[in-house]
Amino acid sequence: MTDTDRHQPSSVPLVDADRTALPSYRLPALDQDFLLGDSMRGVRFMLEYAKAEEALRDWSVRSTIVVFGSARVRENGPGRQAFWYEEARTFGRIASERGGALKPHGKVRDNVIATGGGPGIMEAANRGAADAGAPSIGFNISLPHEQAPNAYSTPDLTFRFHYFAMRKMHLAMRANALVVFPGGFGTLDELFEILNLRITNKAPPVTTVMLDRNFWETVINFDALIDHGMIDRADCSVFRYAESAEEIWDILATTDLTAHSG
């Protein structure tokens, strides 16, 4: 049968039951084949924005502090992993206790811990918020490995995304600060995304703090980028280094943690 034949009216009449069973008769909102088709990609993108946005509003979340870091770090891991995990957990608790997430301020919550929702550093930061009795957010992404929601993000604020772009948008759009712990490709991707938004003035002037200066200066040679004329030295002023959770908070406390609180 050719495509032309397939779209010609049938000479054999269908009974009513047959018509109601046809895919064309399904309500569009209940037709998964239709919703998951190429033509509905924009609608799916919009749905990923709207679902999380509605839940965050229900919880009165006005602003966040975003914590990035490796999913591979373990609480009892080798080398510096145990230290990084504990500092992320401590920071999640400190920020939740002191930043406005624990109790609504004027019917809103500010500086709520938000992570990628997975294991490792993300788990540690969500766990710290849970230690303080505060809500925290997990913006998960569908991946073949590593990604599953950790046990510490608030259940109502634990989301799953298909599109990296929409996940990144939700991570960035309410952030009053970005705290970056050691990590790999995913962490670097998120870090440079935020730095680029800041340098190009596509995002408010939020503070970015990177824990463990030795790690970051070993992994990224910012001086080489400057020497080769790829960035200006002034570009490096958009981030700072810290060596502990308390130092991270001390830095944030001297900045304006209200970029998304107006």
Image: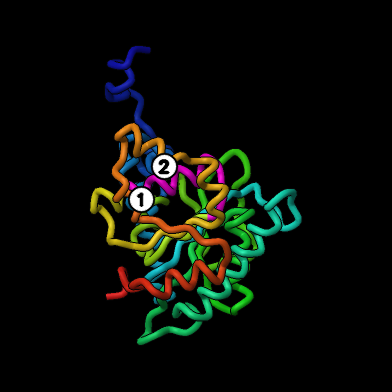
Local secondary structure at mark 2: helix
* Side (left or right) of 195 relative to 80: left
- Residue 159 visible in the shown view: no
> Residue 191 placed where, x, y %?
43, 49
> Residue 48 placed where, x, y %?
39, 53
Whether residue 55 is in magenta: the answer is no
In the foreground, 5 or 177: 177
- In the picture, residue 259 is in which quadrant? bottom left
In the foreground, 129 or 258: 258
Residue shown at 71%/57% (left/top)?
Answer: 82
Residue shown at 37%/12% (left/top)?
Answer: 1
Identify which amino acid the numbered label 1 is placed on.
Cys
> Residue 237 placed where, x, y %?
34, 55
* Side (left or right) of 192 relative to 134: left
Q: Which quadrant: the C terminus? A: bottom left
Asked whether the beta carbons under mark 2 and mark 1 sit within 8 Å of each other, the answer is yes
What is the C-alpha distance between the residues marked 2 and 1?
8 Å
**Mark 2, residue position:** 222
* Side (left or right) of 69 relative to 257: right
* Side (left or right) of 152 relative to 2: right
Q: Up-down: is 70 above or below 3?
A: below
Counting the numbered discs, the total is 2
- Residue 155 visible in the shown view: yes
The main secondary structure of the magenta stretch is: helix
In the rendered structure, which segment of residues is drawn in magenta? 181-196
Local secondary structure at mark 1: helix
Label 1 environment density (alpha carbons within 10 Å; few <14, some 14–19, many ≥20): some
Res 236 label: 1
